[in-house]
Amino acid sequence: MSLKFLLPTVFFCAVATGSLAGNLQPREGWVVLETTKTYSQLIDDVKTASKSNSMGIVTQAGPTKAAANRGITIPGNRVIGIFNNDFAVRVLATSTAAMIEAPIRLYVTEETDGHATLSYKVPSHVFSPYFSEGGIELVTLASELDQKFSTIAQQSVE
């Protein structure tokens, strides 16, 4: 089938199922946690939980405010990258290429009902393409990060 016919079909299916926007769906390597918290509260709680678990807020980005400045209203949407120097040095000791995946990102999205969802890719999933290069040390480090991110996520949504 040519791309000319495939794209309208995909678009129609997405519109028909309502999947162009809305709640994130679970997918391989992701954790998706719906909450009863507001978008702003969940962002604050992610920052607090990250810091209390010795992880730094490295990056933050989202289109919500920029869209509002253009007169466009969209649901809250923020990506928060967290990491720390200890993990960075340890990743680099196993695989220079793997460091491109840092910081690991937490994704806060506002739902139509006013509640927020916290999502993230599991660190072992993110780093898995580098396991053959980084060896057991990178596998172990990714497992440690899995536990740390699970703790941060649980503290954030409680």
Image (spheres, rainbow, N blue to C red):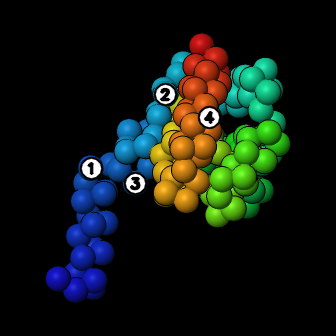
Question: Closer to the camera, 28 or 36?
Answer: 28
- Which numbered mark, 2 or 4, is in the foreground of this view? 4
Q: What residue does disc 4 label?
A: 145
Q: Is residue 56 above or below residue 11?
A: above
Residue 12 at x, y percent in the picture: 26, 64
Mark closer to the chain start, 1 or 4? 1
Mark closer to the chain start, 4 or 3? 3
- Which numbered mark, 1 or 4, is in the foreground of this view? 4
Q: Secondary structure at mark 2?
A: strand
- Which numbered mark, 2 or 3, is in the foreground of this view? 2
* Residue displayed at 77% across by 32% down: 55
Residue extending furthest toward the top: 158
Q: What residue does disc 3 label?
A: 20
Q: What residue does disc 2 label?
A: 33
* Residue displayed at 73% across by 54% down: 92
> What amino acid type is highlighted by mark number 3?
Leu
Quick check: marks 1 and 3 in contact, CB under 8 Å?
Answer: no
> What amino acid type is highlighted by mark number 4?
Leu
Q: What residue does disc 1 label?
A: 17
Give neighbour class at mark 3: few <14, some 14-19, many 20+ (Cα, 10 Å). Answer: few
- Which numbered mark, 4 or 3, is in the foreground of this view? 4
- Residue 114 at least partly seen: no
> What amino acid type is highlighted by mark number 2?
Leu
Question: Closer to the camera, 119 or 114?
Answer: 119
